[in-house]
Image (tube, grey):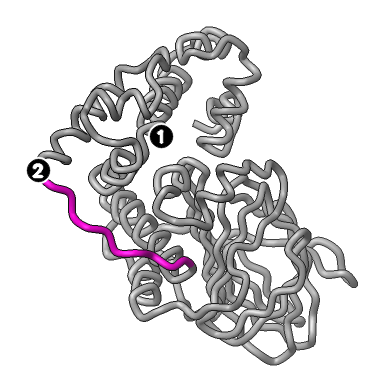
Amino acid sequence: MQCIQMSIHEHGPLQFKHGFPVKYEGPFLAGANAISVQDDDGTIVIQEIVTHEYSLRHTFVRLVNKTIIKGITLGEGLYSRVMRKNKLCHNIKGAGKITLREKEFSLIRADGISGSITYRGKKEYETFDCWFSPSLLHKIAPSFPSIQSILENDPGGKTILLSKRNKTIDKKTDAIIHEMLHCPYSDDLQRFYFETKVNEYLLSLLATNDTIKPEKPPTEYQIRAVYKAREIAINNSAGRYTIAEIARMVALNASDLKRIYMQVFGIGIFETHLEKKMQQAREFITETGKPLKEIAAIAGYKWTGNFNKAFKKYYGETPLQYRRNC
C-alpha cells in the first residue's frame, strides 16, 4: 500500500514532513514511519508500516473547517478500514459512497484506491487501515466465500466492495488493533509479532464479514492422507496431477481432500504448489543476478509475460519491481 498523493481541492497537494508535529500526543504505531502536516487549517498525522505481504496505516486528522481531501493509494490486494474515532463519508471510485461510523469497517478488493473523504471541522478523526497482499488472500480464500468468489472470477482491475452493509468490529478485532498499536517488541521480534497479528486480524475481519460454518475435526487417517497429498503436491512441479488424481492416490474423495487439507495446512493444494514455485522464484530474484527470463523458465513458465503476471498476482509487484525494492 503506497500513498501516492493527498490533496485539498482549494489548496492542491498536501506538503507532508517527516516525523510528528509539535504537541502530538498519539496514538503511536510502534515501528512505523510518520509523516505529518500542521498549519492554521489543522493537523494530519499518518503512520505507516509497509511490507511485501501487508501494510498498516494509522491516520489522525483534526481540521478547523469542513474539508474534502482527495487521495490515491496503489497496490493490488484487499483494503480494510476501521473507523476508530468519529464518522467519515467516503466516495470511492468503483465502490461509490461509503459512510463509516465509529467501530465500523469496510473491505474493498482493488488494484488501488482512488477517492475523496469529507471531514467536518472542529472534530478529531482516527482510522486504522490494513492492506493485504494477493498471496495472503490466496492462502485463506477457500475458507471465506467472499474472497474465494473474487479470486475465482479474477476481476483484474475491478474494484469490489466486500462489506455490502456496514458491520461493526467485535471486541476481539478491536483488541488486535490495540495490540498492534502498542507492540512491545522491536527489530526481528517486532516483524514476527506484526506478521502474526496481521494474519489474526485478517481472519477476524473476514469471519465477521462472512458466515463461517463450523467443521468437524479430521480423523488420524485423513490427516495422514493429506500429508501424503502435500508431498505429492510439492513434488508436482510439472503439474502432472490434478486434484482429483491426487485424491484417488491418497484414497479420499476430492471435496474431502480439499476441505481437510485446508483445515490441516491453512492453504489449498494448488496454492501449495504455487507457493513453492513463487518462493523459489523470489529467492532467485533477491539472491542471484539471474535474468528474469531464466527465472521464469526455472519456475515452469514458457513465456516471461505469464510469469510476470503470476508473480504480481501473488506478491503484488512484478519481478522487476520486487528486485528493485529489495
Residue at left offset 34%, top offset 40%: 258
Q: Amino acid at mark 1?
A: Glu
Left or right relative to 250: residue 150: right
Could you tell me what secondary structure mostly forms the magenta stretch?
loop
Q: Is residue 213 magenta?
A: yes
Whether residue 6 can be seen here: no
Q: Which residue is mark 1?
A: 271
How crowded is the residue under tag 2: few (<14 C-alpha within 10 Å), some, or many (20+)?
few
Whether residue 301 can be seen here: yes
Residue that extends furthest to the right in the rendered view of this protein: 10
Q: Quadrant of residue 127?
A: bottom right
Q: Amino acid at mark 2?
A: Glu
- Residue nearest the viewer, comparing 315 with 192: 315
Residue at left offset 54%, top offset 14%: 301
Q: Is residue 130 above or below residue 106?
A: above
* Residue 320: x %, y % from top left: 60, 24
What segment carries the magenta color?
A: 210-219
Query: Is label 1 in a helix, a strand or a loop?
Result: helix
Query: Is label 2 in a helix, a strand or a loop?
Result: helix
* Residue 66: x %, y % from top left: 79, 85
Q: Which mark is residue 220?
A: 2
